Image: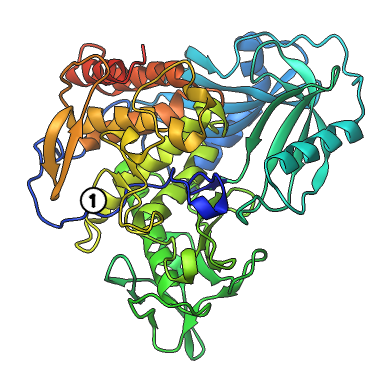
Amino acid sequence: MSPLYARRKRTTLAIATAVAAGALLATGVTTSATAQPAAGPLAAAPTQLSTAARTTLLQQAQAGAADTAHRIGLGAKEKLVVKDVVKDVDGTLHTRYERTYAGLPVLGGDLIVHTAKSGRTEGVTKAAKSAIKISSLKPQITAAKAEKQAVSAAKTLGSAKTTADGARKVIWAGSGKPVLAYETVVGGLQDDGTPNQLHVITDAATGKKLYEYQGIENATGKTLYSGTVTLNSVQSGSTYQLTDTARGNHKTYNLARKTSGTGTLVASSTNVFGTGTASTSSSDQTAAADAAYGAAETWDFYKSTFGRSGIKNNGVGAYSRVHYGNAYVNAFWDDSCFCMTYGDGSGNVDPLTSLDVAGHEMSHGVTANTAGLNYSGESGGLNEATSDIFGTGVEFFANNASDPGDYLIGEKIDINGDGSPLRYMDKPSKDGGSADYWSSSVGNLDVHYSSGVANHFFYLLSEGSGSKTINGVTYNSPTYNGSAVTGIGRAKALQIWYKALTTYMTSTTNYKAARTATLNAASALYGSTSTEYKAVAAAWSAVNVA
């Protein structure tokens, strides 16, 4: 689960994640890079699969999983469980697998097998390269001890009402030599009221904590942020329910200040949802209209840009919950409920339901169902940046005059209280915490700040370095090495990042590996001698990733 932004203490409203927010000005000059058309049907671009075709490919992959495991050199105790499949226009298949060892889940053992149309294996991308050889599957510490340590770790981070659902035995392969371990998931609430899903990995031989990450990734509608928009609804008796049958039956619910449950399906007797103005009422439908609109635009962005039908690419919609908690200043994606949740902000008058936030949160779901980037360290920063990148794409795609596209992060929701954005993709350090460039310590930052490196890379790849004005907003993007970077346009940059995420990144991808993944994607899409490939290399060099 990934909250919208980082928290130091609830009273300080620390800035960090979100997604590109609306521009301060509605007019301006669009650069030629931005104006480039979307990428065409390139041979290595993903092809749109029907639900039946995708299901067939998944079933075929699972049926042949044992042969695949043998063919790629896995041990006798290792088995593959298919998670996802991507088929390129030229027939190449990229099949993503989870792994088990002697029946135990292997965390950090995910891999992708790349298969040519002819059936030839072209390569394997692994999250962990070390061979799995466990001398004993008998733990030296009890599950109860691991569980107790995990609860203690959650309390140290400020969690309240902490509970654990029991420790399970796993193989931990996410860092270094694979070992027998326990995974404990601690529930309760984080210090700002966000639900807690702290995953703690404990060495089953020594009791040492190996790793931890947070699992919460944080009709007509008169919206607060996007003006009057068209929404889909379903008539039920004398009322209209906020259910979008055109987009996987996405539903919008009202939690009415509660912090658990699904809530009540939002309904209207007039088929008009919201008033377009802020309200402190827990029954106000304006926040629901914004959330439903954001979900619809995000669905359409993924479908139109990448041929992806919903978060899981299976045609099934998630659902949204508004009015979470009391004056809750955040929003989050929770893969366990397959839902987005939005607080109403300080004083319950600034709901975090802007278009960019919806795109950001739903994109966490896409990441969870593709690369599954671990929400800690450099992979966590890449996870957050992915949501910022695609959230930015959603905002430009929507082309809404009330919230025009930009490379600012979250100024519509005004978490800072002064109208300033949460983050800036052209120069991330302008927010006071994010990193402009990679360094050996960047993985120690909160993931909402370490994401700055990838956000900066994406801006440079799209628009280039230096000063320019786009949709009325002025940017000035520096480079680490003083180089001048020429952008290739946002459309191509999005295609490269999406292909890298869905076919080359794994749960443990760090910045160096992300560079490799995006170069592989650019090579597959445009060729290894192309302008696009060279631009990817130049943009990474400009943020000190080599």
Q: Is residue 35 visible to us here?
A: no
On screen, residue 183 above or below 15: above
Query: Residue 260, position in %: x, y?
Result: 67, 64
**Amino acid type, mark 1:** Gly
x%, y% of residue 394? 32, 50
Q: Residue 75 appears at what percent x and percent y?
A: 72, 10
Examine the image and state in which quarter residue 324 appears. bottom right
- Residue 361 seen in render: yes
Residue 72: percent from the left, percent from the top? 60, 11
Residue 395 left/right relative to 218: left
Number of residue marks = 1
- The quarter of the picture where residue 515 lies is top left
Residue on which disc 1 sits: 405
Residue drawn at x 49%, y 44% as measured from the top left: 364
User: Which element type, helix, strand or loop, lies under badge 1?
Assistant: loop
In terms of image quadrants, where is residue 145? top right
Relative to 95, is 42 on the left or the right?
A: left
Q: Residues within 10 Å of mark 1 (few under 14, many from 20)?
A: many
Colour setup of the view? rainbow
Q: Residue at x 73, y 33 (%)?
A: 200
In the image, residue 172 sits, relative to residue 351, either above or below, namely above
